[in-house]
Image (spheres, grey):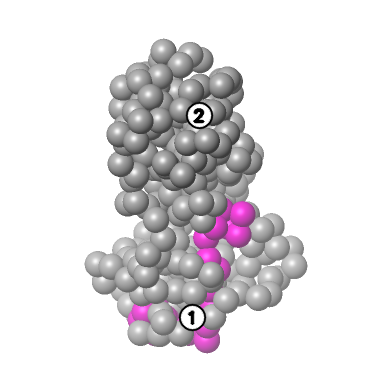
Amino acid sequence: MNSNDNKIFKICVSSAKDSLDSEIDLRFGRCKYFAVVEINNGEILNSQIIENVGASQGSGAGLSAAEQIGNLKVKALITGDIGPKAGEVLSQLGIEVYKKSGIIKEAINEYINNNLAENKENAPSSGTKNNNNISVDRPRIFIPLMDDNGEDSKISLHFGHAPFFGLYDASANKLTIKENKLDHSDLSKSPVDQVIEAVDPTIIFVQDMGRRAVDLFTARNILLKTGPYKTVGEMINNVDKLEDLTKNCGH
């Protein structure tokens, strides 16, 4: 940060209210406001308070907030807790992240005086997805299923209308199977948003998928993978060989 002492740059702070005297909102994705401050030669040049567009979303609030921060062209973000997906987006954008509670103006002064330690908990690592390659350390894989029969469960050819779904957590080598209760009549929340809200997957394994679902998952930085596997057990045994889904069923 010392290299920027003589440069003009912006930082952002998640805020509970529309003032620099407000408390830092520790909920990054659900904070009501962002305080954006322009700094020049160690002094606050000007500031503005903007609403967080992700705060009112049913799901994906953290990703939406991260994208909004990226569009603001800030150098750093001061906030509380950040989910791994939003943290990865911010890291890829080169935005420094600092975890801090208290009054916004005081935190900004600490930043200016180099008294904040950067939070690197959510930076991309060998255990997360990167450049569409899979590391088997941390993936949470969502699989549409025809039945509930453990690793012998058959993989459904249809994503949205499968009777069951499985979630395979590779870090714990744990498979969970549940009845599919996606509500396709819910106009406020798409099946894609319902899946993300329910199980927070990093990968979706499918044989085929509609174009709209492909676009929605891709926009949320969730990988789509496929392969010639008929059962969950076959997919688990070949998790490092899964291929990118390059087609869709067109609907």
Q: Which residues are magenta?
A: 217-236
Amino acid type of the residue that numbered disc 1 sits on in the rendered structure: Leu
Quadrant of the image containing the N terminus: top left
- As drawn, the residue found furthest toward the right would be 250
Where disc 1 sits, the SS reads loop
Where disc 2 sits, the SS reads loop
Amino acid type of the residue that numbered disc 2 sits on in the rendered structure: Asn
Rendering quarter of residue 217:
bottom right
Q: What residue would you read off at disc 1?
A: 242
Nearer to the camera, 103 or 50? 103
**Neighbourhood count class around disc 1 (C-alpha, 10 Å): few under 14, some 14–19, many 20 upward:** some
Asked if the stretch drawn in magenta spans residue 239, the answer is: no
Q: Position of residue 197 (x, y in %)?
A: 45, 46
From this viewpoint, is residue 134 visible? yes
Q: Position of residue 19 (x, y in %)?
A: 48, 14
Q: Which labelled disc corresponds to residue 41?
A: 2
**Neighbourhood count class around disc 2 (C-alpha, 10 Å): few under 14, some 14–19, many 20 upward:** few
